[in-house]
Amino acid sequence: MPVGRVKWFDPDKGFGFLVSDEGQEVFLPVRALPEGVKDVKAGTRMEFGVLDGRRGLQALGATIIEAAPSVAKAQRRPAREMAVVVEDLIKLLDNTSNGLRRGKYPQGSQAKKIAQVLRRVADDIDA
């Protein structure tokens, strides 16, 4: 049976898509999910049967192999502590902006660190 990861799933619409390990997109209807499961998170690893229908590949009888990592919302940091974090972020972005003005993107590892910091601060603010 093919194995892949959930690309996205919308429980309100009742479907989503998987991406197989071979790179093929596979339609994932809610009826293909294991009994009692109505929603799966993006990144969930699944094993599934495949039907090649009129509209392309469709998953049948999907089984969850590995659930997506939990991104449960943490408790908010105190506002004064977040103020310091945001000030540091501003300095980081200001330095990045100066490099971009000179026509230089951050190096690969630095760019990933900046992106991680931005995501983390956004999560902390949104908590």
Image (cartoon, rainbow, N blue to C red):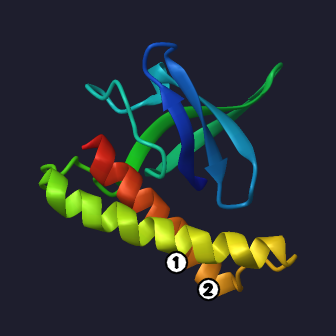
Local SS, label 1:
helix
Report the residue at 25% width, 25% height from top. 36
Image coordinates of residue 60 in percent, x first then y, are 55, 32
Task: Residue type at mark 2: give it.
Answer: Ser
Image coordinates of residue 101 in percent, x first then y, are 81, 71
Cα separation, mark 2 vs mark 1, equals: 6 Å
The image shows residue 31, relative to residue 73, as above or below, that is above
Report the residue at 44% width, 67% height from top. 89
Residue 68 makes an appearance in the image: no
52 left or right of 127? Answer: right
Residue receiving disc 2: 109
114 left or right of 51? Answer: left
Residue receiving disc 1: 113
Judging depth in this view, the residue of 92 and 44 nearest the camera is 92
Judging depth in this view, the residue of 30 and 113 nearest the camera is 113
Residues marked 2 and 1 touching at CB (< 8 Å): yes
Q: Dot 1: few (<14), some (14–19), or many (≥20) neighbours within 10 Å?
A: few
Residue with the most extreme top position: 13
